Image (cartoon, rainbow, N blue to C red):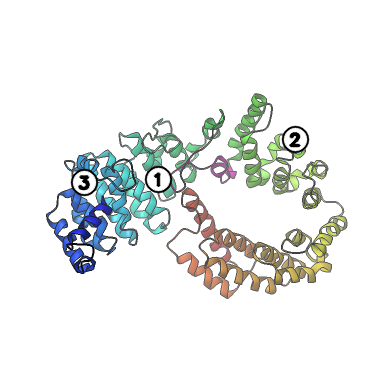
Amino acid sequence: MGTRAAAGSQEAAGPGPGSRDRADPRVVRAVLDQVVRDGEPVLKVATVVAWASLDRDVPLRHTGLLLDVLTDPAVRPRFEQIWFPPDVESAFTRDDVAAWVTGLFGHRPHTALSFVIRLAEAADRTGDTGLHRVALDEAWRLLVPRPSLAPRVLPLAARLLDHPDDCVRLKAVHLLAILAPLSAPYADRLAALIDDPGTDRISWIEGTVGDFARWALVRLDDPRALPGLVEALWAPYREQYARGYATGDPRGPEIHEVLAPLREHADVLLPVLRREVRLQYERDGDHGPLTGVLVRVAEAWGPAALPALPELMPLLKDTRYSLSAVDALVAMGPGAASTAPAVRDAVVLDHAANHRRIAWAAWRIGGGDDDAVLRLLGEAVEQEPGPAYGPVSLLADFGSAAAAHGERVRHIMDTAEGLTAVEAAVALAAITGDPRPGLAVLEQAVTDAAGDDDGYGFLLWTLRAFLRIGATTPGARHVLHQVRARDRRLSAHSDYRAVLDDEEARSLIEAVLALP
């Protein structure tokens, strides 16, 4: 309808295709202004939408009109009667148009959120459930890229926690999960919703109100989330469950993303996770999705996951899991030393890099012949060409004992790109005891990553490299202060992962800024 309104307005601006007046923007604006003043309500909104393609600030000047029409219950049915966009089979509803109009304020996110809040306030007065759904959806879309909006989104979502509509309630609880720890004052209300079976049968967001309430409590580190947590996370997957979602829409996290931060509660959660893995194997006669979850969680929990050794050890004979299981055993530290012989005999795909990693892991876990392992890794680093250059990152564990390979590592650091250069910088600092050459490389790496909207993964690697070296530089500090001040998520994602990534990145930035 907006496109048609624009076309109709342009046709009204002149008598024919060759008319000079038709191309005169002043005439077009005059016609549009007349429709906004005198047209029927829905056509007024359509005209503002069309006019915004000529002047993006037009919606700002007509906010009151847009709110009046979109929140008027008497006008609502008219949208479906006359709003037919080109190339779309069905009419737009009032809710569709409300979301579209909110997008017109995209260049002014704080203004857009003010518009959304006013939509929600109008919905409160009229009991307009559809408008509540729109307000929560648009608040989510605005919040994902802009952390600064969180304090204003919080009360909007919180007041809808008890809404009678399942969809509204689910969207509100999802927002409070994302908003943690700001949502801590609402922990009791969230705990009361853990058993809420409500689902979203409008936009089909997977999960229940209770699922999102439990996740919110997990993010608040509230122990009321723990009873039944593993079972609730695993329940949808028991019967060949496959996830479906649209990127950018609200959805629940993956199982390992929920459990990985809960190391302090491993004594409660790990027995249940182990039991479910065993039951899965007994039922299917093979390992399945939960096995992969256990491996990832064990690596994240480190020594706290040592009781899971009986479930992890058989995976060393399965090429699907063996390398990941080895990483988990390495993370467990000295407590897993007894597994070194089994690690040494792990079955992996027949590739030199895999065999080298197994030799290194067995040495890390159980000790042994340092010279033999160093010789194996060092020869690969010396001989393999770029861009991989062999297992340069593993040489860092040998420190000065790897001095014979120092010049090769320096060459790799100076010539390689991306992660390989960062790994070489860490290795060189460990080998020589002099962090300065490596820090110069890391400073350039963090500068490059900070200027690349798609480079946030590389930024995380570089931040971890600073922490391994244990020092930073004035130039890197300057860049990181600038990055920290940005009002945008430090992530390339556009869903809940943007928030998780941003939290991790900002935590690492604080840790690096605390270095000498």
Question: Depth check: 387 or 376 in front?
Answer: 387
Determine whether 44 is above or below 75 in the image. Answer: below
Look at the numbered disc 2 and give the secondary structure of its residue: helix
Q: Nearer the viewer, residue 438 or 145?
A: 145
Disc 2 packing (10 Å; few <14; some 14–19; many ≥20) = some
- Report the magenta stretch's main SS: loop
Say which mark, if any, is on residue 176.
Answer: 1
- Which residue position is annotated with label 2? 314
* Relative vertical location of residue 389 with respect to residue 217 in this rendering, above or below: below
Q: Earlier in the sequence, mark 3 or mark 1?
A: 3
User: Within the image, what quadrant is residue 439 found in?
Assistant: bottom right
| Residue range of the region highlighted in magenta in the rendering | 243-264
In reply to whether residue 137 is colored magenta, the answer given is no
What whole-number distance in Å separates the C-alpha atoms at marks 1 and 2?
40 Å
Q: Residues within 10 Å of mark 1 (few under 14, many from 20)?
A: many
Q: Which amino acid type is marked by label 2?
A: Pro
Q: Is residue 472 visible?
A: no
- Classify 10 Å Cα crowding around label 3: few (below 14), some (14-19), many (20 and above): many
Kindly identify which numbered label has been placed on residue 325: none
Residue 144 in percent (x, y) is at 42, 53
Q: Quadrant of residue 417?
A: bottom right
Above or below: residue 329 compared with residue 454: above
Left or right, 385 with reference to 498: right
For the residue pair 137 and 311, the one nearer the viewer reads as 137
Q: Is label 3 or label 1 in front?
A: 3
Estimate the x, y position of residue 303 in percent, counting from the top left. Answer: 68, 45
Amino acid type at mark 3: Thr
